Image: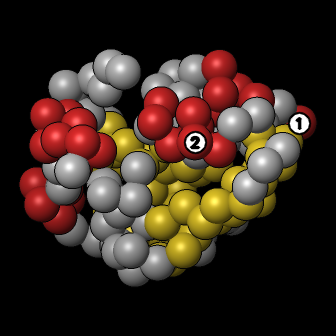
Amino acid sequence: MSNPSSLKYAETHEWIRREDNGELTIGITEHAQDLLGDLVFAELPEAGQRFSAKEECMLLESVKAASDIYMPVSGEISAVNTALVDEPELINQAPFGEGWLFKIQPDNIDDVNGLLTAEAYEQSLDA
């Protein structure tokens, strides 16, 4: 399993990419999509919604399970990947690319520093 070292990770299996404009792009890891299996539905949050860190913010359903997705840091949803409404399988096919979930404007960009590195995330999977 390869988790890009340029990203940060949450213990709840979300990845976080810091964009040049200060936004954060959020998705789920390869490990998370493997556990879920073939995704069939994504209940996305709406732009403008605010969530606290570790708060449930969306739902993914697969052929074998449903899973809540958690907000890795506090902030406001600035964009959602609407392609997932018709093609939730994009998450399975490219979890670090076209399968991104949503973007947020974080309340405090420095909160990202408290998240896991790729190496620490991978070690948490082995624990």
For the residues labelled 1 and 2, the Cα–Cα distance comes to 21 Å
* Quarter assignment of residue 33: top right
| Residue drawn where x is 78% and y is 49% of the image | 64
Q: Which mark is residue 37?
A: none
| Residue drawn where x is 53% and y is 56% of the image | 78
30 vs 97: above or below: below
* Quarter assignment of residue 25: top left
Lower sequence index among marks 1 and 2: 2
How far across and down, in percent of the image, does residue 100 sit?
55, 36
Label count reads 2
Q: Is residue 106 left or right of residue 123?
A: right
Q: From the viewer's perspective, is the residue at label 1 or at label 2 nearer?
A: 2
How far across and down, in percent of the image, does residue 24 sit?
36, 47
Q: Which mark is residue 86?
A: 1
Query: Which residue is denoted by mark 2 in the rendering?
Result: 35
- Name the one closer to the observer, 87 or 46: 87
93 vs 41: above or below: above
- Name the one closer to the observer, 75 or 62: 62
Q: Secondary structure at mark 2?
A: helix
- Name the one closer to the observer, 94 or 110: 94
